[in-house]
Image (tube, grey):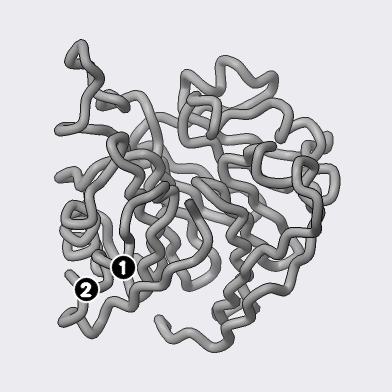
Amino acid sequence: MKGLILLSPVLLLLAASAAPAAEAFETDTFATSEGDLVITFIGHGTLMFTFGGKVVHVDPYSSLADYQRLPDADVILITHEHRDHLDPKALDPIRKKSTVILANPASAARIEGARSLENGQKTEVLGLKVEAVPAYNVVHKRDGGEPFHPRGRDNGYIVTFADKRVYIAGDTENIMEMKGLDAIDIAFIPANLPYTMTPEMAADAAMMIRPAFLYPYHYGETDVGRIAELLAKETDIQVRVRRMK
């Protein structure tokens, strides 16, 4: 169930609006019980999943791609309302009448027609099971003492594509709720200091979740190779680094 069948980097060529040349987005393909799941690594905290003829965009961000050139969304997931995660300029080109947008409550209030999901709530959209899970800071805080991402406000998501469970952590630290995440096949863990996790925290998160495949994402200038070093003895967790600064 957890085996990777095909790895296919650089299948999608798109011209980013601010870039002088075409940008190649890396992709990985996983076999599921109902066909291939293709993950496109847009960058930062932004992902695109293609499965069963459906397209799922996560936190689309116009600074990373020309969304006029990307496929329309069947589902859009918004983790929280920070501008690099909730970007109307990216939403508009990929939104069609039937697009379902799921977002944390603060983001849903800013997007006409969006459906609000709070931590712990679950739904099913176009045959995909989606669960909103907590995403927050405990250690990393603003100068005034407020966490960059306060508890109870933002979402991570678990999306089930047939027999593959994909965890998109959002902006979070290695929080205790991760111990309760069961049977995660693929996990996206942030490491963008000072806003989310150190490599040590990310490795600890991986130890709690124990995904078959771990992708550090939204990692800025963090040395994510250190995460792989820390998990080198965990032979059941494969760390994969893609261009997700």
- Say if residue 134 shows up in the picture: no
In the structure shown, which secondary structural element does the residue marked by tag 1 occupy? helix
Residue for badge 1: 225
Percent x, y for residue 7?
57, 83
Q: At 80% across and 50% down in the image, what residue appears? A: 20
Which quadrant would residue 96 be assigned to in this image?
top right
Mark 1 → mark 2, Cα distance in angstroms = 6 Å
Q: At 49% across and 61% down in the image, what residue appears? A: 160
Residue 23's disc is none
Q: Relative to 126, is 178 on the left or the right?
A: left
Number of marks in the rendered image:
2
- Judge whether 8 appears above or below 242 on screen: below
The one of 208 and 27 positioned closer to us in this rendering: 27
Which quadrant would residue 75 be assigned to in this image?
top right
- Say if residue 209 shows up in the picture: yes
Percent x, y for residue 202?
24, 55
Q: Relative to 241, is 44 on the left or the right?
A: right
Q: At 71% across and 33% down in the image, what residue appears? A: 91
The one of 61 and 128 positioned closer to us in this rendering: 61
Q: Amino acid at mark 2?
A: Glu
Crowding around mark 1 (Cα neighbors within 10 Å: few <14, some 14 to 19, many 20+) is few
Q: Relative to 30, is 239 on the left or the right?
A: left
Percent x, y for residue 228?
27, 72
Residue for badge 2: 229
The one of 66 and 130 positioned closer to us in this rendering: 66
Percent x, y for residue 168?
43, 52
Q: At 63% across and 35% down in the image, what residue appears? A: 101
- Residue ranking furthest to the top: 144
Q: Amino acid at mark 1?
A: Gly
Q: CB of mark 1 within 8 Å of CB of mark 2?
A: yes
- Judge whether 183 appears above or below 176 on screen: below
Crowding around mark 2 (Cα neighbors within 10 Å: few <14, some 14 to 19, many 20+) is few
